[in-house]
Image (cartoon, rainbow, N blue to C red):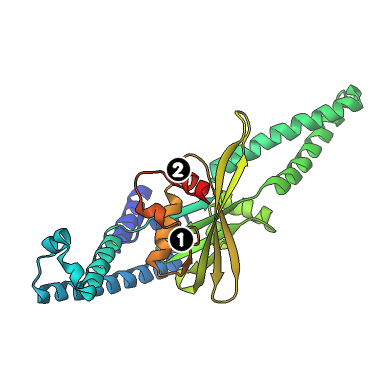
Amino acid sequence: MDDIKTLKKIRFLRELDIPLEMIERILLNQDEFQNILEQHLQTLQLQVENLAEIQQKCLKLTQKNILLLDAVVDGEFYADNDYDKDIKTLFQKITEFMQPYSVITIGRKTTPYQLVKEMFGYFIIVGFIFLAMLSVLGRHLFTNGIGWIIWLVGTFIFWVLFMLINFHEKYYEFQDVDFYIFDSHKMKLKSIMAILKQTTHQLAKHYFYKDIDNVKIIIEKKVGGIGFGPMNYYNVIYQFNMLNGQHFTVNSLLYEKDDQDRKLVYEILEYHHVHIIDDRNFKAVLIQKELSLYEYLEKNMEKD
């Protein structure tokens, strides 16, 4: 019966055209429903505006009485700058509307299972180290059981300290109309509990794209790696400058394996008409199809 009730909730939310990613968040935390509903309303409003604009473009095309396919293939519409602009805008809007973005995550986002496994591994490591330290002091500590009590208490204390020092969760989650920044710095214990409860969104900082003044993209070439020797990698940096004066940076390391998330973040920013300062012409990656993102940067950074 619980499964049937859950399916009814999913069906109801899908009838509202709420994406599956957001439905999952609602099912995991009922308190998210109102917040997600407000986000979804903004998404629907954007779609309504896009459809209205597409409708106007289609009306203009019918009034001009020009065959759209022939105009595109033969390039006849290039003679009319206004028409050229209308056609390009129309295609852009149609493409954006037909290909909605899913949630794009950049950075470290740990699942509860990964965190538990990581915590267990740390406990084993700290336990062996503390056991070795006690053994040096003398095996007689373990004859009456006091040593094991000291080991257990000491291991737990050092394990907690080790987790608080080494744990750092930081990710950026880009959605259709808004984005979240989660950084465990200065709230590590609270962050660990939030990951286990899957409530990190309640601690994350929430922003809308309309609140962005500009985003500057910086690409840094780095050298690092172990094992087979040094290797090149790139740090794609997004510097967000908000209208309220806030500033924050999104670092995204790129190795040889191409990652589409960086391209999608750029496309999302463009979709929301965010002013992008792109000194390296990062947008060119979206246009060319011959090279992967890493290969493209290797080729163009060498030129610089």
* In this view, 87 is above or below 139: below
Q: Residue at x 51, y 62 (%)?
A: 180
Q: Earlier in the sequence, mark 1 or mark 2?
A: 1
Q: Residue at x 46, y 52 (%)?
A: 262
Going by the numbered disc 1, the residue's amino acid type is Gln
Going by the numbered disc 2, the residue's amino acid type is Glu
| Quadrant in which residue 229 is drawn | top right
Give how far across and how far down residue 225 sits, in percent. Answer: 62, 36
Task: Give the class, few, some or many, for how many residues have Cα within 10 Å of label 2's Cα (few <14, many ≥20).
Answer: some
- Residue 73 located left or right of residue 176: left
Is label 1 or label 2 in front? 2
Q: Residue at x 60, y 41 (%)?
A: 116
Is label 2 in a helix, a strand or a loop? helix
Asked whether the residues under the numbered discs 1 and 2 touch, taking CB atoms below 8 Å apart as contact, a structural biologist would say no
* Residue position marked by numbered label 1 in the rendering: 30
Front residue (pair 53, 291): 291
Front residue (pair 8, 284): 284
* Residue position marked by numbered label 2 in the rendering: 295
